[in-house]
């Protein structure tokens, strides 16, 4: 059945850099892509990604299969509809409702979701069984990450189809969550909460925390993940450390004052020069260039040492 979806175009609804790199990921897979966005920079950003990919890998990604539209229109031809929105229930439901009218009954609808439960988004759907959570990481066309979120309402055949397509054609190493919310988000924000606690209480600076993550987890996570790394190092020892350390970890449900100040001033990090660090425009462009190059290089290393195939 997944061959049916392989032949059909992909629809992307959203704006911002993640939606741009998802479009490149689909073009890279040879898909016909329609993008619904009001972002006037979308075409230029997608073309720039394609140019950068050619410089890094020698691969040419054709953009003649891409169509960008400002407004949705009725078209039943799509196999998969991908939605990228902010983490807002109303915004997500509006997008889902619009796409349900726009795509055929057999189309898979997949939406990014970090803290909002899938069940909450399915409530007002005419076909809740075809709605799934689908989380990416930026840039989508150079990373293997893909998180698929399903629940008891989700059609298992459609889930299997999406999983197979992601593996075979989108160059992903997807994993399936049988629940309501993102596992990636829970792990990420648990780490962020502890980092906030350490900085707020003077145990470490922001730069200290970044160096600790980069120079420790930055080496082993791409290779093994958490559990396999513990096996590699000696599983039992981690249990002994947890006995004492777990009770010391932060359980705060509020962001610390220094982070609330950044949020209060509309801090978007490199996008507007105000975040945990300060940036000027020249430095930001350099960071973007380096980050893109680094992503291509890491992708090459991860492919060289595939997960689960080293023994």
Image (tube, rainbow, N blue to C red):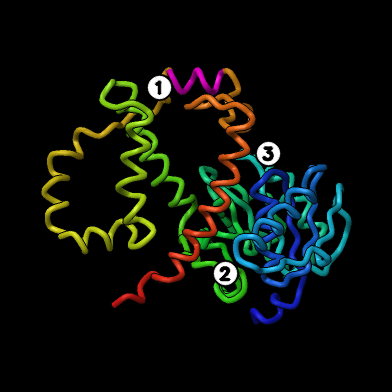
From this viewpoint, is residue 158 visible? no
Q: Residue 222 or 48: which is nearer the viewer?
A: 48
* Residue at figure coordinates x 28%, y 63% from the top left: 228
Secondary structure category for the residue under label 3? helix
Between tags 1 and 3, which lies in front? 1
Between tags 3 and 2, which lies in front? 2
The residue labelled by disc 1 is: 256
* Residue at figure coordinates x 52%, y 21% from the top left: 262
* Residue at figure coordinates x 66%, y 69% from the top left: 59
Disc 1 and disc 3: Cα gap in Å?
Answer: 27 Å
Q: What secondary structure is the stretch in magenta mostly built from?
A: helix
Task: Find out whether residue 262 is within the magenta segment.
Answer: yes
Secondary structure category for the residue under label 2? loop
Q: Position of residue 240 (x, y in %)?
A: 11, 49
- Quick check: 208 left or right of 101? left
Crowding at label 3, few (<14), some or many (≥20) Cα neighbours within 10 Å? few
The residue labelled by disc 2 is: 171
> Is 106 drawn above or below residue 98 in the view shown?
below
Quadrant in which the N terminus appears: bottom right
Between tags 1 and 2, which lies in front? 2
Disc 3 and disc 2: Cα gap in Å?
Answer: 32 Å
Q: Position of residue 176 (x, y in %)?
A: 47, 64
Give the mark nearer the N terminus: 1 vs 2: 2
Point out the stretch of residues depicted in magenta. 258-264
Q: Position of residue 84 (x, y in %)?
A: 66, 49
Secondary structure category for the residue under label 1? loop
Quadrant in which the C terminus appears: bottom left
Q: Residue 123 or 255: which is nearer the viewer?
A: 255
Disc 1 and disc 2: Cα gap in Å?
Answer: 38 Å
The residue labelled by disc 3 is: 90
Q: Position of residue 123 (x, y in %)?
A: 63, 50
């Amino acid at each position: 059945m997944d061959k049916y979806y392989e032949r059909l175009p992909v629809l992307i609804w959203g704006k911002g850099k993640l939606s741009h790199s998802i479009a490149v990921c689909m073009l890279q897979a040879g898909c016909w892509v329609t993008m619904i966005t009001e972002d006037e920079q979308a075409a230029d950003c997608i073309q720039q990604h394609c140019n950068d990919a050619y410089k890094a890998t020698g691969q040419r990604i054709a953009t003649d299969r891409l169509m960008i539209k400002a407004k949705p229109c009725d078209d039943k031809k799509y196999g998969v509809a991908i939605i990228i929105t902010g983490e807002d229930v109303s915004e997500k439901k509006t997008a889902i409702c619009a796409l349900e009218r726009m795509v055929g009954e057999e189309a898979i609808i997949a939406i990014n979701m970090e803290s909002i439960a899938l069940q909450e988004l399915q409530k007002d759907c005419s076909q809740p069984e075809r709605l799934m959570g689908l989380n990416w990481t930026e840039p989508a066309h150079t990373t293997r990450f893909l998180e698929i979120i399903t629940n008891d309402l989700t059609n298992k055949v459609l889930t299997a189809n999406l999983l197979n397509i992601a593996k075979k054609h989108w160059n992903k190493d997807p994993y399936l969550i049988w629940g309501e919310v993102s596992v990636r988000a829970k792990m990420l924000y648990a780490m962020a909460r502890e980092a906030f606690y350490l900085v707020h209480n003077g145990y470490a600076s922001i730069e200290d925390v970044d160096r600790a993550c980069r120079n420790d987890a930055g080496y082993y996570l791409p290779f093994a993940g958490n559990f396999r790394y513990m096996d590699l190092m000696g599983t039992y020892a981690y249990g002994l450390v947890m006995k004492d350390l777990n009770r010391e970890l932060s359980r705060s449900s509020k962001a610390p004052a220094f982070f609330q100040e950044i949020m209060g001033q509309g801090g978007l990090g490199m996008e507007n020069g105000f975040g945990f660090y300060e940036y000027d425009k020249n430095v930001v462009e350099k960071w973007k260039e380096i980050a893109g190059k680094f992503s291509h290089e890491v992708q090459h290393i991860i492919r060289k040492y595939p997960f689960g195939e080293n023994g």
